[in-house]
Image: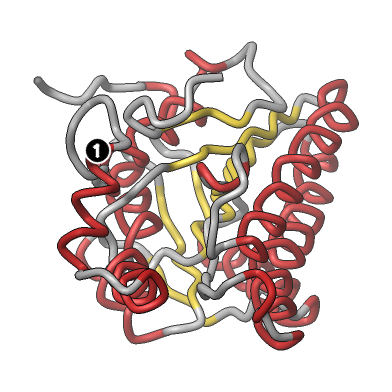
Amino acid sequence: MGHPKFAELEGLKAIVTGGGSGIGRAIARTLAKQGVKITICDINLDAANTVAQSISGHALKIDVRSRSSVEKTFEQAADIMGGYDILIANAGVSTMQHALEITDEEWDFNFDVNTRGIFLTNQIAARRFVAQGQGVIVNTASLAAKVGAPLLAHYSASKFAVLGWTQALARELASKGIRVNAVCPGFVKTGMQEREIDWEAKLRGVSPERVVEDYIAQTPLGRLETPEDVADVVVFLCSDSARFMTGQGVNVTGGVYMT
């Protein structure tokens, strides 16, 4: 089955944070296939450059935890592309630990990237979108933003916050022609997941293979999710086909979570 073509996306300009790998890379590539001009912003500039070269896009280094870094990088992206119409706020991290063993450092790391990073990138992009009277924001949340995940209590908390922010920002900006949504992926086969499988196996005292089997067993559609499964939904949310959707946390979980 071919991918649908959203003609209205042709020639639009997007910033994708965390676009150097995993879900962000798939989103950047899928948007590029729709004719969207892309600037990939990632803390790993080499990874960002590799992806940008493959889609004839641009790459910039960013630290989404830093207001000055986000402001400077987004301004550079606007200069390079002649503005931007779409923000994909995807940069995220995880660590895994029993709730009673989580350190302050682990808590802060997850919240600084996953929550503060969403706040800063959304706010700075939205100020431009308000001035130009239109724009689309899609945030990457998680299945763990809908249901608390054992061994990921701090990560879950940071992603629940992303959904609360997304809903509130969507309500504030709707009258200004700006839509704000989030996607909530499930068990996605990425480098981050590979690390989490090893961590979970050690913390549970089981094999990595058992962890993967458990993920698939929880997924009614019967397989691990791919980054492209998420990317296709993000493209839809950026398109006019989603013109009456805002403030949503869209589940892309293969049925793991259904409400």
Q: Extreme left residue here?
A: 1
Residue 258, placed above or below residue 155 = above
Identity of the residue drawn at 79% across and 81% down:
68
Q: Is residue 85 visible?
A: no
Q: Position of residue 27 (x, y in %)?
A: 36, 48
Q: Is residue 178 visible?
A: yes
Which quadrant of the view contains residue 8?
top left
Dot 1: what SS?
helix
Residue 234 located left or right of residue 136: left
Rendered-image quadrant of the N terminus: top left
**Number of other residues with Cα within 10 Å of mark 1, as a class: few under 14, some 14 to 19, many 20 or more:** some
Color theme of the render: secondary structure
Q: Position of residue 20 (x, y in %)?
A: 36, 70
Kind of residue at disc 1: Ala
Q: Position of residue 47 (x, y in %)?
A: 32, 79
Q: Nearer the viewer, residue 206 or 31?
A: 206
Q: Quickly name the residue at label 1.
A: 217
Q: Extreme front residue here?
A: 205
Callout count: 1
Q: Nearer the viewer, residue 177 or 184?
A: 184
Q: Nearer the viewer, residue 212 or 54?
A: 212
Identity of the residue drawn at 21% across and 68% down:
208
Residue 258, placed above or below residue 192 = above
Identity of the residue drawn at 22% across and 26% down:
221
Residue 58 located left or right of residue 82: left
Identity of the residue drawn at 24% across and 46% down:
226
Residue 129 located left or right of residue 77: right
Which quadrant of the view contains residue 194?
bottom left
Residue 8, placed above or below residue 49 = above
Q: Nearer the viewer, residue 15 or 80?
A: 15
Rendered-image quadrant of the C terminus: top right
